[in-house]
Amino acid sequence: MPVKLSKKYLQNFIREDEYASISHQIAAAHTLLENRSGAGNDFLGWLDLPVNYDKEEFARIQAAAKRIRESCDVLVVIGIGGSYLGARAAIEFLNSPFYNQLRKPGTPEILFCGNNISGDYLNDIIAMCGDRDICVNVISKSGTTTEPAVAFRYFRDYLIKKYGADGAKQRIFATTDKARGTLKELSDREGYETFVIPDDVGGRYSVLTAVGLLPIAVAGCDIKRLMQGAADARAAYSVPDMTKNDAYLYAAIRNILYNKGYSMELMVCYEPRFREMNEWIKQLYGESEGKDNKGLFPASVIFSTDLHSLGQYVQDGRRQMFETVVTIDKPVSEFIIPEEKENFDGLNFLAGKPMSYVNRKAFEGTLLAHTEEGHVPNVIVSIDKADEYELGYLIYFFEKTTAVSGYVLGINPFDQPGVESYKRNMFALLGKPGYEDLKKELEARL
Ligand code: PA5
C-alpha cells in the first residue's frame, strides 16, 4: 500500500478493546457512504471521481494546460478555500516550496490570488506580473465569492486592455458551475473556455476536478498518475473492515482520541514541501467537522522548523492534542553533510551522512520525546515518495477519512453553514443592497 498507517505509538493511549468498540460505528458510517444515505449525500461525487470523471473534459484540461504553458510567463490562479488550496498544495508538494523559482523549463510561474481581501497582497501580485504575458484561471463554483470576484474584476479588465477582447478571451479559463452562476454566464457570453465543478463535489473535495487539475497540469505534473493513485486508493479504502482499511482505522483513532478529550489534531511533516498540503488538510478537516459545537481543531507544523517554536508547547504545554505525522520515506534529492577540517562546530560525526538520515533521526527522537515524556499520542502516516501517484492516493485517503470521521462524529461532513455568518455581516457592513436593516443593527453593536 502506498500509504501506510502505524498505530504503534498509540499503545499507551488507546487499548485494543477500544478499537473493537468503535468498529460498529465505523461500519455504520461505511454503510451510510456506500448506500449514499447519510447527511450531505448529494455531495458524494468525490467518492467515484477517480474512476468516473469526464474523460473529454480531462483531455481539454491537458490541452488547455499546454496552451497556457506556451502562451504565458505567469498563470494567475484566482480562487479561495476549496477553489485554490488543493492546487497550490499539489504543485508545491510535487515540485518544491520554491516552485516559481525552480520550476521545470517551459512551465510558467503560478501566482495565487483572490484568496484574501488585502489590497497590499493584490498589488504585490500585480507588481510580480509586471508586463509579462499572463493567463488567468478563475475558479469559483458560485461565481459570487467576494475575494476572487474582486481579483478577477481587475485581471479581466487588465487582459482586455493589454490583449484586446479577443486576445483576453484566449487567456481566461473559468472553472465554475456547469450551468449556473454569474461566472458561468459571463464566460458563455464572452466565450471563455470553461471547466466544470460538478454539482455533487464540494469545494474542499474538489482537488481532483478541473479546480485542481488545470493548475496542476500547467505546472508540468502528470495528472493521469495523480488520478490513478486516487483510483487505486478508492479500491483499497472501499473495504468495510477497518482492520483492513487504514482510512477507516485512522477515522476510528481520531474519534477515539476526540472522545477521550483530545481536542486538537496537529498535522506534522518533516518536509517543507508538505506545508501547503497541511493547509489543504486543515480546510478539509476543519470545514467538514467543525460544527454543532463539535470537532477536532486541526493545526499544523513543519518540523524541525517548528520544533524551535511550537515544539515547546507540544512537549510541555496543556495536554489537549495528538499528532498525525506524515513521513515521506525517500527524499526527492539528497544532500550530503560536508566534512569540516577544523570541526569548529563539532558536527564532523555527521560528515558524509545524508540530510534525510538526520531528518529521520530528528523524527524518531521527537516521536519518543512527545509520546513517552510529553504523553502526546502520535499517529504515523507514511508514503514512500513525493510523486503524483502517491499524492493521488494520499488525497483520497484523507478525503475518505474525513467523510467517515464526520459520520462517526454525528455531523454532516459535506456542508459549511458556518462560513455564511461572516459573509452576511460583511455584506451588511459594506452596504450591499438588501442588507439595510442588518447594517443598522450591526453598526449599533460595534
Ligand atoms: O470548500 C468550500 O466549499 C469553500 O471553501 C469554497 O470552495 C470557497 O468558499 C469558495 O467558494 P466558490 O468556489 O463558490 O467561490
Image: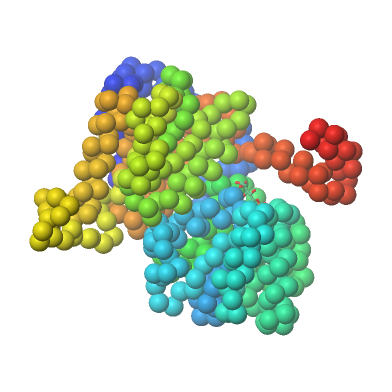
Question: Residue 22: x and y, percent?
Answer: 42, 21
Question: Residue 409: x and y, percent?
Answer: 52, 26
Q: Quadrant of the C terminus?
A: top right
Residue 240 shown left or right of residue 166 in the figure: left
Question: Residue 225: x and y, percent?
Answer: 39, 60
**Residue drawn at the location 79% of the way across and 46% of the way down:** 427
Look at the image and tell me whether residue 294 can be seen: yes
**Residue drawn at the location 50% of the way across and 48% of the way down:** 280
Residue 88 shown left or right of residue 433 in the figure: left
The way the protein has been coloured in the rendering is: rainbow
Look at the image and tell me whether residue 376 can be seen: no
- Location of residue 216 with respect to 86 vertically, above or below: below
Q: Nearer the viewer, residue 99 or 131?
A: 131
- Location of residue 295 with respect to 72 vertically, above or below: above
Q: Nearer the viewer, residue 182 or 32?
A: 182
**Residue drawn at the location 52% of the way across and 77% of the way down:** 73
- Location of residue 27 with respect to 81 vertically, above or below: above
Q: Nearer the viewer, residue 374 or 181?
A: 374
Q: Quadrant of the N terminus?
A: top left
* Quarter where residue 397 is shown: top left
